[in-house]
Image (spheres, rainbow, N blue to C red):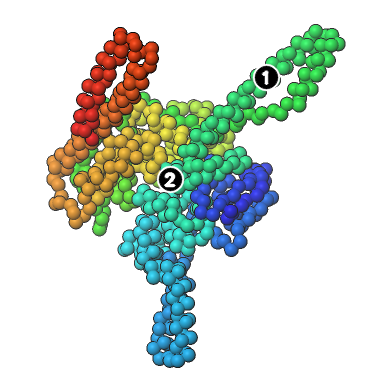
Amino acid sequence: MILSCQNISKSFGENVIMKNASFHIEEREKAALIGNNGAGKTTLLKIIMKELSADEGSVILAKDKTIGYLAQYQDIHGHHSIYEELLTTRQHIIDMENRMRSLEKEMKHASGEALEALMNHYTKISHQFEMENGYAYKSEIVGVLKGLGFSEEDFDKPIETLSGGQKTRVALGKLLIGAPDILLLDEPTNHLDMSSISWLETYLLNYPGAVFIVSHDRYFLDKIVTKIIEIEQASVQTFTGNYSAYALKKAQLRDARYKAYLNQQRDIRHQEAVIAKLRSFNREKSIKRAESREKMLNRIQRVEKPAEVQNKMRICLEPRYVSGNDVLSVEALGKSFPGQTLFQNISFEIHRGERVALIGDNGTGKTTMLKILNGLLEADTGSFTLGSKVQIGYYDQEHHVLHMEKTIFQEISDTYPTLTETQIRNMLAAFLFTGDDVFKQISSLSGGERGRVSLAKLMLSEANFLILDEPTNHLDIASKEILEEALISYTGTVFYVSHDRYFINQTATRILDLTNQTIVNYIGDYDYYLEKRDELTQIYAPAAGKAVQAETPSESKLSWQQQKEEQARQRKRENELKRVEARIEELEKRDREIDETLVLPDVCTNVAKCTELSREKASVTEELENLYIKWEELA
């Protein structure tokens, strides 16, 4: 055991954050801390790091073990470059290296006992240098920086010129290079693109120490952790397994508790009715029996009614009008900024009912494309066309669609003037804004609160084509799941940008990958994208240097059409292959059953039954032969 929290309690005024929270982390264990926004996850990490004091309880770190903490927001100061900042974590290695060079110079001019002493000293230092990976520390730093999304051109950027997200990535890099015995990471994926998140997954899976993560990225948690520690309504509970195992177990427990509560309530009502009836007889014996039952009822340990899963947002997205089948057609779209080409000659189509995810690394132009489609930016080349009766509802991750000077109530009432005050309050209550909350100014809201206001406006729009830019940012896991359900049941069309791979896997019917300045189409979910990414990227979006000369717009459209047709054929073949394999398995099972039946004493002497089974076996054998041939063709 490397870390133990025992009976931790913490309150802020009357607000109880946690009570008697106990759990432990084993050496090399990968665990997650989850809970709704405001549940106390960051507070618990700060208590572990002694940045906050607990009201009660203790935190015990194993003897001689080191701990590293990545807070959500980092403000690194200094005049170092990015590379130099990470180099500071290896200062003791650099000192050893300098000492080795110094000893080498001294040994050139020494002899006798002095030389022997210098050589012994050199041997000890060089052994320690090697043990601490001294010969590879520079390549290790470069690997971590590239893994976290920094290019070699970024290495010399001064720390003071970086954004908050870039500073957080630098802090994470320093922490990984420092390699403490236990890592405490608060939302480590917030400022990473998909390839960097994937790199971090692999790094943490192979990390020799323990890892304790706060994250809303369910795909990330599924890949890494083997234990879930949940904070819910001030209590802490531990579950073994990854996030999916936790979600299943949690649902089963909640269901069992609710059933136990309902059963007990039914029994209590029955007992109360019996007691009332016995008292109504108004006889000494019946009254005594009623009193006896009443005492027994009072001694029962009452099962508390399980609380709601959370104060849930209630999202119901429904278009007012049905659009035409062709919702969006993009032809030869291109956009550049000085010194950077984002994309060129991009063509694709979106049809009614599709939920299309646009993915790609940071800086490839995803948000720019959404802004072009919403008329907020002009494309350099190409055009796009909206279909018949298409009405767009836009969710902007930067919330430029909100007016910072207005209150929440004014934001809704000014956009939808026909709504009554009661209707507006009811709508805002569905998004967890109640009482005087509705009079908060937009500028004073957190990112998550602004996101909820934007979602409320989106819900009221009754649009039939939703364009969403990072809709899950700042949402906790439960709120993400509610949004997923709303989008899955939505009868309109959705085109969105997201880094949340679990969200994409749950909601997307198609994925467009913006890579190497072009689009690669994947007819399937995120798992399908991972399976086919390398193959299809090489075919449709080769890296610069391998690419042939730029296609003309007509060639680009042809390439897009070829992608769609080829993948449709491929998916059809894969589905057919699965059906053939299932049928082969079914027939092989029946063939074995027939063989087992034919040798039974009461069957082998029954000529009619034997004849019937023999005919069936011949039919099964013939169909199997045809299916084996078909399987070979498909496979």
Q: Check the image and report above or below for 182 versus 39.
A: below
- Residue that label 2 marks: 223
Q: Check the image and report above or below for 359 versus 466.
A: below
**Residue 435 in the image, given as x and y percentages of width and height:** 58, 34
Amino acid found under the numbered disc labelled 2 = Lys
**Residue 269 in the image, given as x and y percentages of width and height:** 69, 18
Secondary structure under tag 2 reads helix
**What is the CA distance from the residue labelled 1 to the residue labelled 2?**
44 Å
Q: Which mark is residue 267?
A: 1
**Residue 287 in the image, given as x and y percentages of width and height:** 82, 13
Q: Residue at x 71, y 29 (%)?
A: 301
Q: Is residue 564 visible?
A: no
Q: Is residue 264 left or right of residue 514?
A: right
Q: Residue at x 73, y 26 (%)?
A: 300
Amino acid found under the numbered disc labelled 1 = Asp
Q: Residue at x 33, y 60 (%)?
A: 151
Secondary structure under tag 1 reads helix
